[in-house]
Image (cartoon, coloured by chain):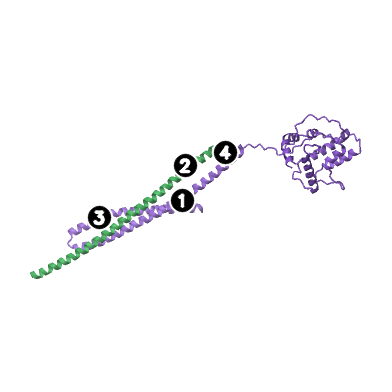
Amino acid sequence: MARAGGISNPVNVGIAVQADWENREFISNISLNVRRLFEFLLQFEATTKSKLASLNEKLDVLERKLEVLEVQVSSATTNPSVFN
Amino acid sequence: MAMAAAMTFDEVSMERSKSFVKALQELKNLRPQLYSAAEYCEKSYIHSEQKQMVLDNLKDYAVRALVNAVDHLGTVAYKLTDLFDQQSSDVASLDLKVSSINQRISTCQTYIEKEGLRQQQMCGAAPKLHKHYILPYSGNSKYPGMVQQLQTEFRQDSSEMKPRPYNSVKTLSWHLSSENSSTSATSRTVQSSVEPKAHKIATDTFKLPGAEREKGQTPIPLSRHLHANGGNMSPDVVSQKTSVKVSSHGGKQISTFRSFENPTMGRQIIRAPPRTKSMLSALFVKNKAAKLKKISVI
C-alpha cells in the first residue's frame, strides 16, 4: 500500500509537472499575444500622430491662405472704384 | 438633387464619426468587464472545490477576452483611419478651392495693374506726318539730287498708278490744284497761250496717280512747266508759300501759290509773304541738315 502510494506520488508529480508546463505554455502564449497587441497599439499611435500632425500643418497653411484672401477681398470690397 | 446628395454626404460623414465613437466606447468598456471577470475567476478558484474546471474555464475566457479585445482594437483603428482619410480628402479639396480663388484674385490684380498703367501712361499721341508730299521743283540748286529723286518717284508712282494707302489724306498736289482752281476764277490775266496750257497741264500733273487721265495726256512734271513758263520762283518763296495741310489735325490752309497766276511776271522779285508757320517750312528748316546728308550720300 505504501509502495502503491509511493508509485502514485511520482505519477502525480509527473502529471502535476505536465499540467504546470501546459499552464505555463498557455500563459506564455497569452502574454506573447498581449505584447504583440501592445506593439501594434504603439505603432498605430505613432502613425496616427504623424498623420494628424501633417493634417494640422495643412490646416494651418489653409488658414493663413484664407486670412490673406479675406484681407484681399475686404480691400477690394472697400475700394470698388478700382474696378470702375 | 444636389441638396439630397449633399445631405447624403454629410449623413455618411456623420455616420462614420458616430461609428468610430461607438467602437471607441465599446473598447473602453472592455476594461471593467475584464477586471470583473478576473475577480470572479479568482474567488471561484479559491472557494470552489473543482479547481481544474475553474482553471479550464478561466483559460477559455482569457482566450476569448483577448480575441475580443483585438477585435475591438482593430475596429477602432480601421474607423479612425477611414475618418482620417475623409478629413484629408476634404482638406485637399479645400486647398484646391483656395488656390483657385487665389489664382483668380491674382489675375484680377494683374489686370487692374495693367489697366492702371495704361491709364497713367502719357497718352500724347504725336502726330505722324507722312512723307508723301510731292514738292514742286523750285530750281533750287541746293537740292538737285533730292529733286531728281522726287521726280523719279513721281514718275514711277504715276506710271504704276498704285492706290496710295493714304487716299484719305489730301496731298500737297491736291491742295495746289484746288488753290489754282479757286484762284483762277477770281483774277487772272491770260497773257499768253502758254499759260492756260501750262495751268491745265500743271493741274493735271497734280492729280493723284490713281485718277483717270485724259487720253493722250501724259503727266509732265512741274519742273518742266516752270522752265517752260519761265517761272522764276525762288526757293525761299516756294518754301514759304507752299504749306501742308496736316491730315491728322486738319491744320493750316495752304497759302496761294502765285507762281501760276502770273507766269509772265518775268524776273520780278516776288516779295515773300509774311512767314507762316507752315509744317513744310518747318520741315525744310529742321530737316535741312538731314537732307544735305542724304544728298551727299546719294
User: Mark 4: which secondary structure?
Assistant: helix
Give the mark nearer the N terminus: 2 vs 4: 2
Q: Is residue B6 visible?
A: yes
State the quadrant of the C terminus of chain A: top right
Question: What amino acid is at disc 4?
Answer: Val
Q: Earlier in the sequence, mark 1 or mark 3?
A: 3
For label 4, the residue is A82
Residue A46 lies, in percent from the top left, at: 35, 52
Q: CA distance from mark 2 to mark 1?
A: 18 Å
Chain represented in green: A
> Do discs 3 and 2 share a chain?
no
Residue sitting at x 89%, y 40%: B197
Chain identity of mark 1: B
Snapshot quadrant of residue B211? top right
* Quadrant of residue B114 within the rendered picture: top right
Distance of label 4 from label 1 (alpha carbons): 33 Å
